[in-house]
Amino acid sequence: MEKKLSNNLGLKVLSVFLAFFVWLAVMNIANPKVTRSQEVPLEILNESILESSGKTYEVIGDRDTVSVYYKVTTSDSANIKASDFRAYIDLADVYEPTGAVPVKLEVKNNSNKLESVVSKPSVIRIETEDLQRKPFNLETKTEGVPEDGYNPGVATVSPTYIYVSGPVSVVGRISSVGIVINVEGANSDLSGTLPVRCFDANNNDLTDQIGDRVTFSRSEIDYTLPILKEKNLNLTFETEGTVADGYRFTGIESSRNYVEVKGLKSDLARANSVTVPKSELNMDGATGDKEVTIDLNKYLPEGVELADPAANEIKVVIKVEALESRTYEMPVSQIKQVGASGQYDYEYDRKSLNIVVKGLKEDLDQLTAAAIQAELDVSSMEPGDNMGTVTLLLGDAYELVSGNSVLVTVTEKGPSAADETTEEGESHSVADESGDPVKETTGA
């Protein structure tokens, strides 16, 4: 029996090896190895190393995963998950000149089923930058429209400022930090807690753009916002001073005649107008219009504020116009004689008066000679020639320059007047061509 077993031993061993390789070939054909990959989250270790040296970093390409490639049999490929791997970079291994950090892999599960495990990329590049910590006062902004007749007041926040930390280039883009309060339809005070928002110089919201590249010393802010009642207050103006000779102050023109304010109902009930004092509107020596810019905030009643803080300035024009002179020919028949005696006759030395009147062109255009009222007091005049001053009732719009003097000849009525006639002649007053009185004697 032993002899039979030992016969052709080499051939038998060869047969076993051949059988094994045939089995192996069959198995590889039936269950071949294939290359597969998984997207694995990329961990970053030792960030504090950079932070401790006042640096921050950014992964170039904003990559947060790597592709892990491996070989596995077809039958096992369905059992391999991304969670079977761990991919990470250690910032302690960063190569400063290029910012390159090698990606390290760990196979946490099914390591006996995997071959040729590699990551792509195998190196991650980071960019380092100085870290900045900057304080910002918190600002409040509103969005939406409150109920008609109401307006937001001034919000109070707690805390009043926070620190923002992040790369210098990112923090440098931030112009202001605050919260945005929705006031849509509000008619009563609001309060609550809101997240911090960042804004650039044009008030564009940067919060979503900068994402987690910055951190806040406090991410939520408590606030209270009073919702105030609105009211329109009329503007009144006081002036002082005197314009230059030959000019007249004609009034005030303002870019607005009222201002919209807000405040508590009790405060608004006491407020009826806003007065701009005369100290703001001085017109001494003015020879033309004078424009003044007024800050209304200085003159608002107590407890009242502007509904629109940006509408605090108004333009006020002190109107000043030059005076003109114009001559009017008024018949002396229009002169009303005051205190006339029935014993005398009153005769003027001319048929009309040339009256020179000064005023604004527009007012002078409205004035006619027929509309001028005139009076002459003759109560103290005695027989003979008397100089009189005519009183002209022109009104405040006009100023008399000249032309109100007149010569009046008073004579007695009846027979007594004939006694004055002598053999030599009769003496009486006449007017020369210029209108001035002269004496003339006529022979008998």
Image: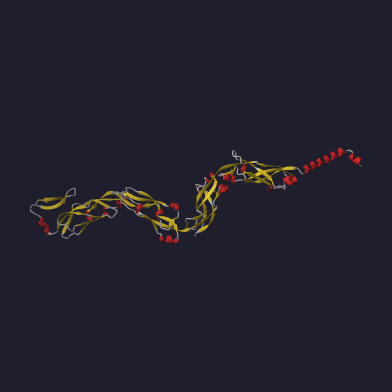
Coloring basis for residues: secondary structure
Drawn side of residue 357 relative to residue 110, left or right: left
Q: Name the residue nearer the viewer: 346 or 259.
A: 259
In the image, residue 42 lies at what x, y percent?
A: 64, 45
Q: Residue at x 45, y 60 (%)?
A: 264
Work out which quarter of the rendered image holds the N terminus and state it.
top right
Q: Is residue 9 above or below residue 433?
A: above
In the image, residue 44 lies at what x, y percent?
A: 62, 45
In the image, residue 215 lies at what x, y percent?
A: 56, 49
Drawn side of residue 185 relative to residue 419, left or right: right
Would residue 363 be visible to someone looking at this image? yes
Count of numbered circles on the image = 0
Q: Name the residue nearer the viewer: 90 or 61.
A: 90
Would residue 148 be visible to someone looking at this image? no
In the image, residue 158 lies at what x, y percent?
A: 51, 55
Drawn side of residue 25 relative to residue 135, left or right: right
